[in-house]
Image (tube, rainbow, N blue to C red):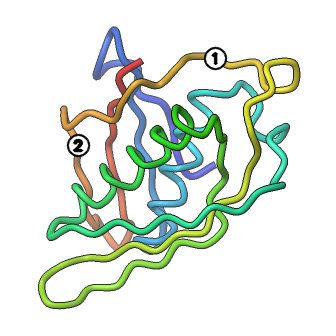
Amino acid sequence: MPYRFLDDIATADVAFEAWGATREELFAAGADALLRTMVHDPKVVERREEQAVTVDDADLDLLLFSFLQELVFLKDARRLLLHPEKVRIAEEGGRFRLDAVLRGEGIDRQRHPLVVDVKAVTLHRLRVACEAGVWRAVVVLDV
């Protein structure tokens, strides 16, 4: 589990720290943490449907923000709970582009008891950095 929840950052929201050996592993860990925030046991979310996501930004922290916010949008608009399958990040012309393949299924309240409803990803304390060769991020979710 390359993430942990942080109890001392936000009292009314949910905060987590995610990490990975690469930027791609970090972003996948962030998506896993987001899914775990919403669903008690993410393993019950079957990988039935495929969804591609592409976002770009000049900053890695805002790229992570956009990626996670897109997952929240897909949960709200298409009622999809998604696992990250493949994440690719490329840097070109001073911008980052993320292409991800996600797999999951529609929300079924019988099989997917929801823990909380994530309304949005916030910019509060958002941080992405490489520290001692490990990519780390702090994210606060509005619930």
Q: Name the mark on residue 37.
A: none
Residue at the image point whose x is 39% and y is 72% from the top: 98
Residue under label 1: 115
- Is 39 left or right of 13, judged from the image as shown? right
Question: Quadrant of the image for the C terminus?
Answer: top left
Q: Identify whether 141 is placed above or below 3.
A: above
Residue type at the position of mark 1:
Val
Residue carrying label 2: 126
Question: Residue at point 41% right, 27% down?
Answer: 6
Residues tagged 2 and 1 counted as in contact (Cβ below 8 A): no
Q: Secondary structure at mark 1?
A: loop
Find residue 92 and report its image quarter.
bottom left
Q: Nearer the viewer, mark 2 or mark 1?
A: 1
Question: In the figure, residue 109 lies in which quadrant?
Answer: top right
Looking at marks 2 and 1 on the same chain, the residue that comes earlier in the sequence is marked by 1
Q: Work out whether 141 lies above or below 47.
A: above
Residue 105: where, in percent of width, then height?
76, 45
Tell me: 77 left or right of 9: right
Compute the Cα span from label 2 to label 1: 23 Å
Is 129 or 28 nearer to us in this picture?
A: 28
Q: Residue at x 24, y 65 (%)?
A: 60
Neighbourhood count class around disc 1 (C-alpha, 10 Å): few under 14, some 14–19, many 20 upward = few
Q: Nearer the viewer, residue 107 or 113?
A: 107
Residue 126 in the image: x percent, y percent? 23, 43
**Disc 2 element:** loop
The kind of residue on which mark 2 rests is: Leu
On the image, the x and y values in percent for residue 9 come to 28, 22
Residue 32 in the image: above or below residue 107: below
Is 31 on the left or on the right of 119, as rendered? right
Q: Indicate left or right for 38 with 70 as reference.
A: right
